[in-house]
Amino acid sequence: MKNETINLRSADRVEIVILADNFSDVLLPGGSCILRPPIAKNGVIPTDTLLAEHGLCLMITTHVNGESHTVLLDAGYSNIAVLHNLNFLDLTLDGLEAVVLSHGHMDHTGALKEVLELAGAGTKLIVHPDAFLSRSLNLPTGEVILFPEFSSRNKLSGWGADIMENSAPLLIGDDTVLVTGEVARTTSFEKGMPGTKIKHDSGFESDTFADDQSLVINLGDKGLVIISGCAHAGIINSIEYAKDLTGQNKIHAVIGGFHLSGAAMAPNVDPTIEKLKQVGMEVICPMHCTGFDVISQLSKELPDNFIQSSVGSKILLNAV
């Protein structure tokens, strides 16, 4: 059954600052849609540097009719890198309208306390209810390991969060940013992360990652910008769901983690890349859990569309 089309307001441009990701390279060249941080400050190369980690945090600002709206997607792995990189880039969280969690894993929530306290009391925290549930991973060896527990609602409130639990699509940023909520699963090959379990009332069961959600921005005739955290729901499912929600079939950019790293996800790689090649996007920027081999393959398969993610970089996308 098709969803009722959501009226996602068109933005004039969007800027995405990479505050946490797995990769950092101060010598990467910029391009037409990506600005790299300068190698020197006031004519001097600093002794400090940007920090990379196995986590994700993106500062996303939409601009429309002279107004701007800023949200944060995720909060990295540690409580160090995001705050350090904000300071290094001379950025603040003043005016931050919301923090959106793509899902409840530790590599997306690490600096949440510090981010909320820095943003100030009353900052909206948009999170799926399943993020609060316990999770585990069954290894091929038979060993079972537990994921770190996500912070309680009381603790988050104590840090100043105005918690908004969502499973349905949600518009934020004066209707310029769409939080997808639970992503419909339509592909035959995107089946999540093998071995993962989540604890419901009846006990641990297979984790379908119902809490996995992405952000969608509309650049008018240019098409949609889709920004994923890990895309545990599948990056192709996430793209197709964004199209279904908005009624917009044109995709301008696909950015974020695609979770194709490791042997367990290897069967998904070729069909995902084949589908991505059919999407027709102008920009693709794989990050975080996509995996080095897959990122390298995408750079070769889509050389005219590919941009390399690196901490501190700013992606600039314009409607015209």
Image (cartoon, rainbow, N blue to C red):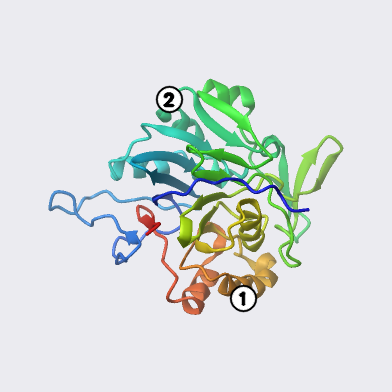
User: In this image, 223 relative to 65: left or right?
Assistant: right
Q: With 26 as the anchor, is 122 left or right in this view?
A: right
Q: Residue 27 vs residue 285: left or right?
A: left
- Mark 1 = which residue? 274
Q: Name the quadrant containing residue 169.
A: top right
Location of residue 315 by image quarter: bottom left
Tell me what residue is drawn at x 29 percent, y 44 percent.
88
Q: Amino acid at mark 2?
A: Gly
**Mark 1: which secondary structure?**
helix
Q: Position of residue 313 (x, y in %)?
A: 35, 55
Q: Residue furthest bottom?
A: 300
Establish if 304 lies above or below 178: below
Q: Position of residue 82 (x, y in %)?
A: 41, 42
Q: Residue at x 44, y 76 (%)?
A: 303
Q: Which residue is mark 2?
A: 120
- Quadrant (top left, top right, bottom left, bottom right) of the C terminus: bottom left
- The answer to which image quadrant residue 156 occupies is top right
The three-letter amino acid code for the residue at tag 1 is Glu
Q: Is residue 83 visible?
A: no
**10 Å crowding of disc 2: few (<14), some (14-19), many (20+):** some
